[in-house]
């Protein structure tokens, strides 16, 4: 009887670990890594095209735009890699620009100016983006370091 209970316990433990019930929040980490990589890509595009890009952030997602100096307006980015993205269910974004928390709308207005700027020389507006699962302390933080490279920091404990 003891052997059967031990085997069942090991099988349940293995299933829990395999299904990701305990441990890291893979969905949150993947969303943070995707956002960081997309920001790097947008910076590269800004430098190559000598064009200003921007990031419009909402609580549930983000979208990129570029500045058209002839028309004096922000245009949605046409590159498929910079298409608007929605975060997976249960994840949310917070934005801090130059040390101030930005109040984010529920949905992005394509006409609105982006909150975060990417200069044509590849420099970012000083920012911090926080991705978290609703009501959790586990946070993925994206921000430029002192050299202008994007860093991804993990804070808190995984659920």
Image (cartoon, rainbow, N blue to C red):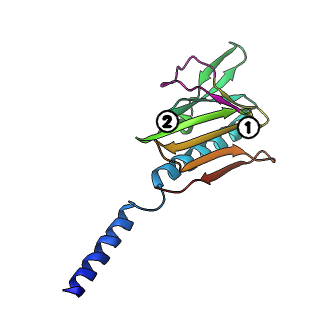
Could you tell me residue 24's position as x and y percent? Answer: 48, 59
Look at 25% across and 77% down and name the residue there: 8
**Residue underneath mark 2:** 85
Which corner quadrant holds the N terminus? bottom left
Residue contact at pointers 2 and 1, CB within 8 angstroms: no
Q: CA distance from mark 2 to mark 1?
A: 23 Å
Is residue 90 found left or right of 42 in the rendered image? left
Q: For this rendering, which residue is in front, 123 or 143?
A: 143
Sort mark 2 into few (<14), some (14-19) or many (20+) by Cα contacts within 10 Å. some
Q: For this rendering, which residue is in front, 159 or 18?
A: 159
Is residue 110 found left or right of 51 in the rendered image? left
Q: From the image, give the main secondary structure of the stretch colored magenta.
A: loop
Is residue 111 on the magenta stretch?
A: yes
Image vertical order of residue 107 relative to residue 154, above or below: above
Look at 49% across and 35% down and name the residue there: 85
**Residue underneath mark 1:** 48
Instruction: Give whichever of discs 2 and 1 has the lower sequence position.
Output: 1
Give the residues in magenta: 100-113
């Amino acid at each position: 009887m003891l052997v059967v209970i031990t085997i069942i316990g090991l099988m349940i433990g293995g299933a829990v670990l395999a299904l990701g019930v305990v441990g890291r929040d893979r969905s949150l980490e993947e969303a943070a890594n995707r956002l960081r990589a997309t920001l790097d890509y947008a910076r590269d595009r800004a430098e190559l095209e000598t064009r200003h890009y921007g990031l419009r952030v909402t609580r549930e997602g983000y979208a990129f735009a570029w500045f058209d100096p002839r028309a004096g307006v922000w245009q949605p980015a046409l590159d498929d890699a910079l298409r608007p993205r929605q975060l997976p269910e249960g994840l949310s974004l917070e934005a801090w620009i130059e040390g101030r928390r930005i109040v984010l709308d529920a949905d992005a207005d394509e006409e609105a100016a982006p909150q975060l700027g990417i200069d044509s020389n590849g420099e970012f507006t000083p920012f911090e983006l926080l991705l978290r699962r609703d009501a959790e302390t586990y946070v993925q933080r994206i921000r430029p370091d002192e050299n202008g490279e994007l860093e991804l920091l993990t804070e808190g404990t995984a659920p």
